[in-house]
């Protein structure tokens, strides 16, 4: 039987997640071999990006063996998420779009973080972003999903003070989501 080349990111991420959960991934090269054996046409560079997008971290398990694990945030990742939340100054939804204001120079960092969160499934209604210098355009999956996406982005910001579409500053994440 001929091997079929699989290249879908979603399927590959699901396979990587299952392999990590089974405790079979000790290195990027081992993961590359496991994926190739399952029909995925991948390189080590692709595997490296996939592990980063999934938030996989490598540390010693109970047996002292270095293995990849999911859901373990490092303090650096926590600090980065906090910094990203502080970049969102205001959210203005319109149709399927949300205009996100950032400090000057902050838009590309924020857009990259939002895209990464989208790929990890943290922000479910986002399909992509476009960044300028101090503005990010976030695009929702549905035609009228801008308001829902704005709520999701507010939750992602981890409670940073946000301006609503009316320009009023909200001091809590709860109020920003309403």
Image: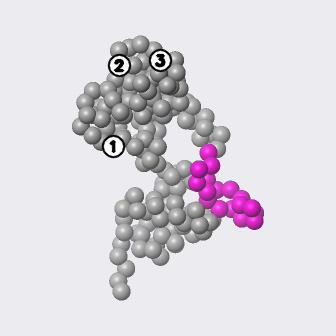
Taking the image as shown, residue 68 lies to the left or right of residue 4, namely: right
Distance CA(mark 3)–CA(mark 2)? 11 Å
Q: Secondary structure under badge 1?
A: strand
User: How many C-alpha atoms fall within 10 Å of the one at disc 3: few (<14), some, or many (≥20)?
Assistant: some
Q: Secondary structure under badge 2?
A: loop
Tag 2 or tag 1, which sits nearer the N-term? Answer: 1
The residue nearer to you, when weighing 86 against 93, is 93
Q: Relative to 58, does residue 164 appear above or below in the rendering? A: above
Q: Nearer the viewer, mark 1 or mark 3?
A: 3
Tag 2 or tag 3, which sits nearer the N-term? Answer: 2
Q: Which residue is mark 2?
A: 165
Taking the image as shown, residue 40 lies to the left or right of residue 18, namely: left
Check residue 170 in the rendering and tell me which mark sits there, or answer none.
3
Q: Relative to 160, does residue 114 appear above or below in the rendering? A: below
Q: Which residue is mark 1?
A: 127
| Start-end of magenta stretch | 57-73
């Amino acid at each position: 039987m001929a091997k079929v080349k699989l290249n879908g990111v979603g399927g590959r991420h699901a396979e990587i997640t299952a392999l990590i959960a089974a405790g079979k991934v000790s290195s990027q090269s081992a993961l590359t071999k496991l994926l190739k054996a399952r029909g995925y046409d991948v390189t080590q560079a692709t595997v490296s990006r996939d592990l980063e997008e999934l938030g996989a971290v490598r540390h010693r398990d109970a047996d002292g063996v270095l293995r990849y694990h999911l859901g373990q945030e490092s303090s650096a990742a926590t600090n980065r998420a906090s910094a990203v939340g502080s970049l969102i100054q205001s959210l203005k939804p319109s149709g399927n779009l949300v205009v996100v204001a950032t400090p000057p120079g902050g838009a590309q960092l924020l857009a990259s973080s939002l895209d990464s969160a989208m790929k990890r499934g943290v922000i479910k209604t986002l399909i992509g972003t476009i960044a300028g210098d101090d503005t990010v355009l976030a695009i929702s999956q549905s035609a009228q999903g801008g308001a829902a996406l704005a709520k999701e982005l507010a939750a992602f910001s981890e409670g940073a003070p946000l301006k609503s579409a009316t320009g009023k500053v909200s001091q809590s994440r709860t109020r920003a989501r309403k």
